[in-house]
Image (cartoon, grey):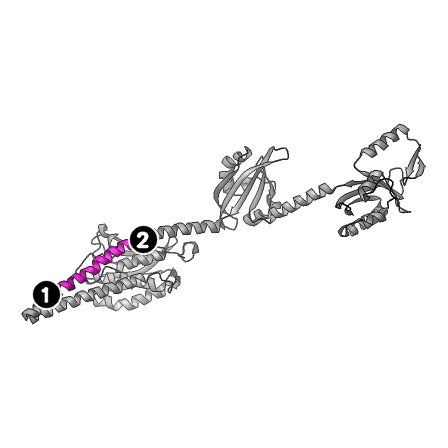
Amino acid sequence: MEERHDRGTPRPIGGIDEADVDRLRRAISGSTEGLWEWDVPTGMVWFSPQAIALLSDQDADSPPLDWGAVRRRLHPDDADDFNAALDQAADQGELDVSFRLRLADGDRWFRARGAIPEAAGKAPPVTLAGSIQDVDELHRALDRNAYLAAIVDAADEAIIGLDRDAAIVSWNGGASRLFGRPAAEVLGQPAALLAPWVRLDLLPDLFPRALRGETVTGQFVEHRRDDATRLDLALTLGPVRNARGTIVGASIIARDVTSRRAMERRLIAAGRDLRRRSDELEQFVYTVSHDLKSPLVTCTGYVGLLEEDLKAGDSDAAVDSCRRVRNAVSRMSQLIDDLLSLSRIGRPDSPPRRLDLPRLLSDLADTFGPRFQERSARLELGPNLPPAVFAAERDLARALENLLENALKYACDTPGTLVTLGALAEDGQTRIFVRDTGPGIDPDYHQKIFGLFQRLDASKPGTGVGLASVAKVASVLGGRAWVESEPGLGATFWIALPDPSDPEDSPH
């Protein structure tokens, strides 16, 4: 029995049955792998016909191949690794290397593996034998998978894989960034440990739906990270199937929509504010037209009387008519000034900022203190004032001036009245107040007095715009104004504004 070496040299094979050799030849010829044998000292290599066909685009009658012929077809990027693998194999007796060859139909991947035959038993190796296999499809599939994995890992969205027991089996870079935990920390852990929303919402309801083959979208949850950062997340949950189509788990895609949801909330708030302003404008136009018309009617009436007085030569009556016309014009001028002041509230030339609240209140107390003394009343500052308030200084100062003017008009008819200008921090707000020991206000009028041109006592001077301005200032700054009072028990007027330490609540 003989075996052919380098497709031409016979070589005897001892102790092997010819039938076994025939079976081996048939197995080799039917295999998609090529075989090779390398005589290390001489560098001669025997390649089977299948190996020749794989490596050279030649038929079995072409000239013999050696490693040099293979090297000449190597892709340049693989040359160093291939040569290093051959050198290591020649020294240690084992070869396992993947490489690309440049063939007529393009570059293809191959894998060569080999070792010292058991019968050789020599070190360093004299002969190595092994196989060579076309692994191009495998490598290209791995490249595609690596490419897709890189895309998934670079995605901003958190993409999480769960098995059927809801344990985390995959965790991309987006998940690490979103939840602040590396993959090594969470892989294999129950998804319920991830966040309360997983335990409370996904596991009882959404996760079983995914295992039944349903894709669930449009789910929004709130998540707080370990550093207390609050996130709004949009979730998509769906089934994961294997190559046979069997559902083997579920995927969670979580997208950070915190900015979008905040914008939506601001748009909703802006819509409500726009509707409120529209209603206010309608009421404003009606009220202004009515209240501005009143002085005009007065002027018209007394101008007519003045004409009659002049015709009759009644100078005293004419002087009285002129005085009344002058008063009506003065009232109209004051109304217009107050309305212009009201219209300026919230303008961008006086934007909100962090104000020194004790200084602001102290300045007001210094300004108004003497006027209260003239009315035999006393104005004092409250204790423990908060250090700051977030507001437009011009608007807030004007609102507090209106409250102090209001106290001068209505609360100081009785000597000894005490008026307190103070503030306190409570429930995430800075609440500024003007408290008096005056006659008090019936609860039926607590809301009405903040309306435009509303006055409880027409005998007192004023236009009825002051408290409306207070309410508008509070609203523009994201807060509110109200009064607490009972007849005979004095009154406390409040302006509550968002705390400057919470920028979420600050007006924009």
Residue furthest to the top: 19
Crowd tier of the residue under label 1, counting other residues whose Cα lies within 10 Å: few below 14, some 14–19, many 20 or above: some
- Observer able to see residue 339: yes
Residue 341 sits above or below residue 132 on the image: below
Please tell me whether mark 1 sits on a helix, a strand or a loop: helix
Residue 285 sits above or below residue 248 on the image: below
- Who is closer to the viewer here, 6 or 160? 6
Which label sits on residue 371? none
Q: Where does the magenta region start and end? A: 279-301
Task: Identify the residue at image location x=39%, y=49%.
Answer: 268
Q: Position of residue 440 (x, y in %)?
A: 22, 55
- Whether tag 2 and tag 1 are in contact, CB under 8 A, the answer is no
Residue 181 in the figure: left or right of residue 67: left
Please tell me whether mark 2 sits on a helix, a strand or a loop: helix
Q: Position of residue 195 (x, y in %)?
A: 52, 43
Tag 2: residue type? Ser
Tell me the residue that label 1 is attached to: 305
Tell me the residue that label 2 is attached to: 278
How would you classify the magenta stretch by its main secondary structure? helix
Give the CA separation, mark 2 to mark 1: 41 Å
Residue 371 in the figure: left or right of residue 307: right
Q: Quadrant of residue 452?
A: bottom left
Tag 1: residue type? Leu
Q: Magenta includes 332?
A: no
